[in-house]
Image: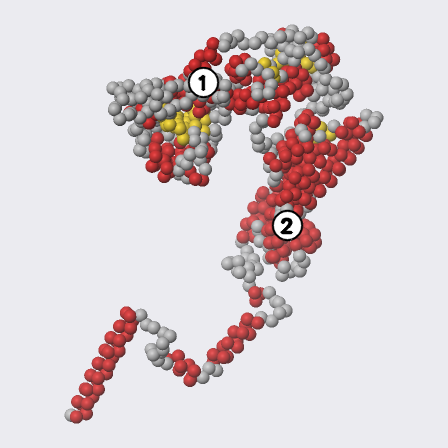
Amino acid sequence: MNREGPKALGTRPEPVGAPNCLNNMTFVISGEFETLTKEQIRDIVMRYGGRVTSAVSGKTTYLLRGRDAGESKLAKAKQIGTKVLDEDGFYQLVESSSPKEIKQPNISSKPAKEADKKVAPTKALSGSVDTKGKQPEAKYATLVTGVTTETSLWTDKYRPKTIQDIIGNKEMVKRINDWLANYDSHKKATSSQVAGDSDIHSYRAVLISGPPGIGKTTTAHVVAETNGYEALEFNASDVRNKKILEQNLSEMMDNRTMTEFFQAGKPKAATKPKGKKVVLIMDEVDGMSAGDRGGAAELAAMIRKAKIPIICICNDVRSPKVGPLLRVCFDARFKRTPANQIRPKLMSIAFKEKLDINPNAIEELVSTTQNDIRQIINILSTYRLNNTSMGYDDAKRIGKTNQKNTILNPFEIPGELLASGNWRQKTLNEKYEIYFHDYSLSPLMFYENYCKVKPQKASLMSTTGNAKEIACNEMELIAKAAEAIADGDLVDSMIHGSSQQYSLMPVQSIFSCVRPAYYMEGYMQTRTGFPSWLGNNSKAAKYSRLLSDLQTRMRVKASGDRSEIRLNYLTTLNERIFGNVAQENYEEAIEYMDNYYLDRENLETLSDLVCTTTKSPLVALPAKTKTAFTRKYNSVSHPVLFQPGSVPIKKAIATPTEDMTDTLVEEDTDYVEDTPEEEDSSLDADISDSKYIKESKKRKNGSSQSSQSKKASSSQSSQTKRAKSKK
C-alpha cells in the first residue's frame, strides 16, 4: 500500500500452466511487479498447487523479486541459496512446468462403515406393560430414533466422538477433561474461588470462550460423555432470566435426568437404572438479551453453591454480560485452529464423501471463513450436492459469497478504497457499502487522507511522462475529488438537517467516499490519520464562546458585534495591553483593561484569538514579567460590570427605553394609599357562615372551646360588676 502499484497493469495476460504444475513449491513475494499485482501472483501460485509464505527460509523454493524488493529478503535468499526470479522468470516457470498429481490421503472405507453401524437405527425401546404384567418386545415406545449417514448433516455425521478427534486447543481440552474427571474429589475444595487463579480444580465452573466454529460446544459435550455425564444444555433460544434460573435450575442441581431411565434394547425388569451424573452447559452466555435480565448474576450466584459441574460458553469474553461469571469460573480461552491442523481432517471428510478437493482450496476456505471449521464443513456439504471436485478458484468464489460480515475500524476504511489493489477487486456495491461500516466517520476519514495518496491515474493520464505534467494531473484529480466531497457535504446537510432525509445515505456514500476514491486510488505516502476536523471544530466552538464573553464585557464601551470586535478591537487591545506589560508599564495596561471591564483571565482569551505567525503575546512574555504584572493587578481594585451572582446591574446601563416596571410599582403604591377604610374593614368580616369555606374538625373544636371559654369569662366579669354596683 505504501509503494507505487504496477505501472502497466493489465497489458499482459496472466500465465497459464498445467494442472498442479507448482505442487510442492514454496514462493516468497517481495516488491511490486509491472503487469501483475501481489494478489494476482498469489492466486496464480495457489491455483497451480504452490504455497506462498511471508519470509525466506530453507523450505523456500523461489523468491519472486519485483520493484523495491526488500533488502533483507534478498540477502537471506543469497545466504541460503534460494533461487530469485523476476516477472519474466515467473511467467516462464508457470508456462513451462509439467503437470503433477496430488497424493490423496490413504483412508480406508472401514471407519465409515463402522460409523454407519454405530448410527444405524436402533430397535424400539422400553414401553408400556400389558395387563398380565409382561413387557411386549415389539410395542416399546421409541425414544431414540437413528438417522442414516446419507441423510444426516455432515456436521453431525463427522462430529468428534472422542477427545482425540477434537481439532486444535489440545492442551486446554485436556485440562477441562481432567477437571471434570476429578470434579467429585475436588468438590469440597472449591468452596472459595479466587479470580485469576490458574488452578482449574479450584473452580466449580469453567467458562470456554473463543471465536465461533472452533469446537467449544463440541468440547463440552465430548468431555461430558467421556466422563459419564449427562449434558443438560441451555442456549440463546431459551429464556434464561433470573426468575427462570431460580425456578428451573435450583431444583435440579442435585437431580438426575429422565433419559437415564431409558436404555436401548429390551429393558431388564430386575435391574434399576443406575443413573448418570448431570453437567449443566450454558451456551452463548454473552448473548443474553434484555429478556434475560439478571441471568448472568443469578447464574454466578448459583455457581458458588452448585453441587454439579457447570460449563459456560461464550464468544466474547470481554462482554460486560460475562463479567459476573469471570469471578467464579475458570477462564478457558480457545484460539483459532491453524490451517495445517484443519487440512487433514477436511481432506479425510472430502475423501469419504468422494469430493476431489485441492489442498490450497481448503486453505482459501480457512482464510475466508476465519478458521470456522463448522462453516467450512457446511460449505463443502452444500457444494457436494452438484459437484465432485473443487479447485482453488472455486473455493475463492464460494468463500467470498459465504464470507462473514466484519466491521472495519475507522483507520481501515480509507485503505479499502484508496489502495489500488482493493479498488480493483471490489464491485460498485461493495465499494459503497464501505461507507456504512462507520457512516459518521467515513466521510471525515476520506477528507483527511485523500490528499496523502499518490493517484495512479496521474501517471496513466500523462502522455510524455514529464514530472511536471504528472504533478499537474495530480492537482487536477485532487480538485475533482474535493468537488465530490463538497457535493457529499451538501447531501449530508440534507440528511442531518431539519428534513432528515436518511434515504440519501447511499448517495452520500457515492459522493463522499466512492467518487473521491475513483480519482485518487493509488498508494499511500504516509500512514492513515484521524480527522483533524473534529479537533478544529471543537476549538472553533470554544473560541466562539470566548469571543461572545468578550463582546458581552465590552458592550458598554464598544457597540460592535462579535465579528467587529474580532476584526477591529482585538489587534489593538493586544498591542496596547501586552506592549505595556512587556515594557513593564503595568498601570497603563491595567487602565486599558479596566476601561473595557476585562479581568486577568480575559488576557488569555485575547492572546488565543489573535492571528500571528509567531508565539502568542501572552506566551512570548517572560515568566518574571507575567508574575510581576499579576501581583500588581491583584493589589488594586477594579470596576465590576457584573454583580457576584452574575446578575447584570440594570441601572448602571443607560437605556433609551422607559422602565415600565418602576411606573407600575409607583401606581400600585398610590392605589394602596387611597384605599378607603371601609373596604379595608371588609377584611375583618365574619366568614364563618360562608358555605364555600369549611374548617377542619380539630380547628373547629378548638375554636368552639376558645369561644366558650371567652363567653364564660365575659359572663363572670359581668356578674362581678353587678355585685359591686349593688354594694
Q: Position of residue 628 (x, y in %)?
A: 57, 47
Question: Does residue 662 appear in the picture of this structure?
Answer: yes
**Quadrant assignment, res 615:** top right
Q: Say which residue label 2 marks.
A: 499
C-alpha gap between disc 1 and disc 2: 58 Å
Q: Say which residue label 1 marks.
A: 160
**Residue located 36% across and 35% down the image:** 245
Q: Secondary structure at mark 2?
A: loop
Observer-nearest residue: 134 or 368? 134
In this picture, residue 273 sits left or right of residue 63: left
Q: Secondary structure at mark 1?
A: loop
**Quadrant assignment, res 59:** top right
In this picture, residue 109 sits left or right of residue 434: left
In this picture, residue 532 sits left or right of residue 698: right
Observer-nearest residue: 294 or 361? 361
**Residue located 63% across and 34% down the image:** 434
Q: Position of residue 207 (x, y in %)?
A: 41, 27
